Amino acid sequence: MQITEIYKSLQGESTYAGLPCVFVRLTGCNLRCSWCDSEYTFQGGRKMSPEEIQDEVARLSPDKGLVEVTGGEPMLQERELVPLMQQLIDDGYRVLLETSGERPLERVPADVVKIVDVKCPDSGEGETFRMENLEVLTARDEIKFVLSSRADYDFAREFTRRHNLASRVNAVLFSPAFHKDATGARDSSHCLLDPQQLAEWMIADSVPARLGLQLHKFIWDPALKGV
Ligand code: SF4
């Protein structure tokens, strides 16, 4: 498998936010979101066998804690990733999969928590979500919308309502996008959409979603990789 990095940090943007977590970041993405902060995953990386990845995860998480598979788009390496995720589950880890939902998710093992990042219009990758994937989401999964404008908010609100997402998944998350070149200050000044503005819209509309902030960007320098 082609791997950009494996490291331990805190989970930053789901209902698991704040928990220690080993991240397995796969190389390659078929999308190009305008605010992407992971462009360094598009190329490069190093080949690792599933066994090497398991060994590294075990070294970083001997207590068999939380493991997040992310990217790039991890489902581009589905053929090897699906058995690896099943093996991690069988070994006793709790496994999260962060994906755009552009690829089919039918083969993802049932015990994996899917965190699906449905792209909004101003990401430049709107309408890439594969609608059939809605049928494979379960009450353990989460759907996230990363928002950079009022148009994105309107899209997320309507998508959430039209598809009754709150009854399908564990959580629906609305999260302000971060400026991709942000560095220095660890505060909301780098958000492309002011969290206070977003909160006010969500309250006014009683949206069945929770506001999420990228926790790691408020703990470490937003430009720092591997956190
Ligand atoms: S899907 Fe993720 S990794 Fe790919 S371009 Fe969008 S934000 Fe970046």
Image (cartoon, rainbow, N blue to C red):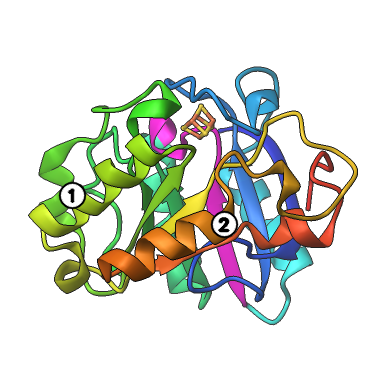
The verdict on residue 44 being magenta is no
Q: With respect to residue 48, does 125 lie above or below?
A: above
Residue highlighted by disc 1: 158
Residue at 73% x, 76% y is: 62
Question: Disc 1 on helix, strand or loop?
Answer: helix
Q: Position of residue 134 (x, y in %)?
A: 15, 51
User: Is residue 182 something that shows in the picture?
Assistant: yes
Q: Position of residue 199 (x, y in %)?
A: 47, 64
Quarter occupied by the N terminus: top right
- Callout 1 amino acid: Glu
Magenta extent: 65-77
Q: Position of residue 208 (x, y in %)?
A: 26, 70
| The quadrant where residue 214 appears | bottom right
| The quadrant where residue 129 appears | top left
Between residue 38 and residue 121, name the one nearer to us.
121
Q: Position of residue 37 (x, y in %)?
A: 65, 33
Q: How much space separates mark 2 and mark 1, taking CA atoms? A: 19 Å
Please identify the residue farthest to the bottom as the structure is shown. Answer: 63
Question: Disc 2 on helix, strand or loop?
Answer: helix
Q: Are marks 2 and 1 in contact (CB under 8 Å)?
A: no
Mark 2 or 1 closer to N-term? 1
- Callout 2 amino acid: Pro
Residue at 65% x, 76% y is: 19
Residue at 56% x, 60% y is: 196
Residue at 28% x, 33% y is: 103
Please identify the residue farthest to the right as the structure is shown. Answer: 184
Residue highlighted by disc 2: 195
Q: Is residue 107 left or right of residue 16?
A: left
The verdict on residue 67 being magenta is yes
User: Is residue 113 something that shows in the picture?
Assistant: no
Q: Is residue 188 left or right of residue 116?
A: right
